[in-house]
Image (cartoon, rainbow, N blue to C red):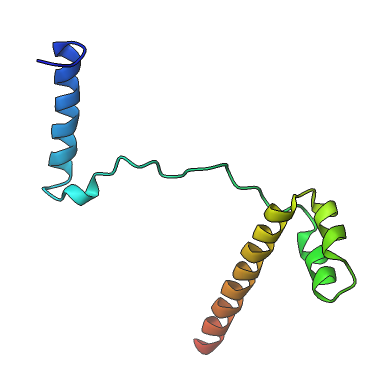
Amino acid sequence: MGGISPNINNIVLETIADMLSAADGNTNVISFKPKSVGRPGIAFPDGWDEKYAQWENGSLSSKAFMEWAGMKKATFYNKLTEYKELLEQEEEYKAKFQKNI
């Protein structure tokens, strides 16, 4: 029989059978991939909104903004992109909400 022991083999087989029965024959439901990979994300620091507005109107340099946020260059620009996407989503939501009034 291969494996570590018959008991371990039985437990593994029972787990697989349970997963297959829960999937109702749809084996695409079963995924052994981790839900998240990589490092956990970091939150926007307090005051990001104000600093972003200053950066956007040109009164704050990227370097100063980056140093204030305590981020390395790649992280900083990734957070800028994420923040811009959040602002766009907020604008879309507001526009959609205004249409419904």
In which quadrant of the rendered image does the N terminus lie?
top left
Q: Position of residue 82 (x, y in %)?
A: 62, 63
Q: Position of residue 58 (x, y in %)?
A: 86, 74
Residue 85 in the figure: left or right of residue 70: left
Image position of 79 with respect to 14: above or below: below
The residue lying at 69 percent from left, 60 percent from top is 77
Residue 45 in the figure: left or right of residue 33: right
Q: Position of residue 87 (x, y in %)?
A: 64, 71
Q: Position of residue 44 (x, y in %)?
A: 70, 54
The residue lying at 60 percent from left, 75 percent from top is 88
Q: Quadrant of residue 9?
A: top left
Extreme-right residue of the structure: 59
The residue lying at 82 percent from left, 63 percent from top is 62
Q: Nearer the viewer, residue 47 or 8?
A: 8
Residue 39 in the figure: left or right of residue 21: right
The residue lying at 76 percent from left, 50 percent from top is 71
Residue 72 in the figure: left or right of residue 30: right
Count numbered badges in the picture: 0
Q: Nearer the viewer, residue 1 or 19?
A: 1
Q: Quadrant of residue 84?
A: bottom right
Image position of 83 with respect to 66: above or below: below
Image position of 58 with respect to 14: above or below: below
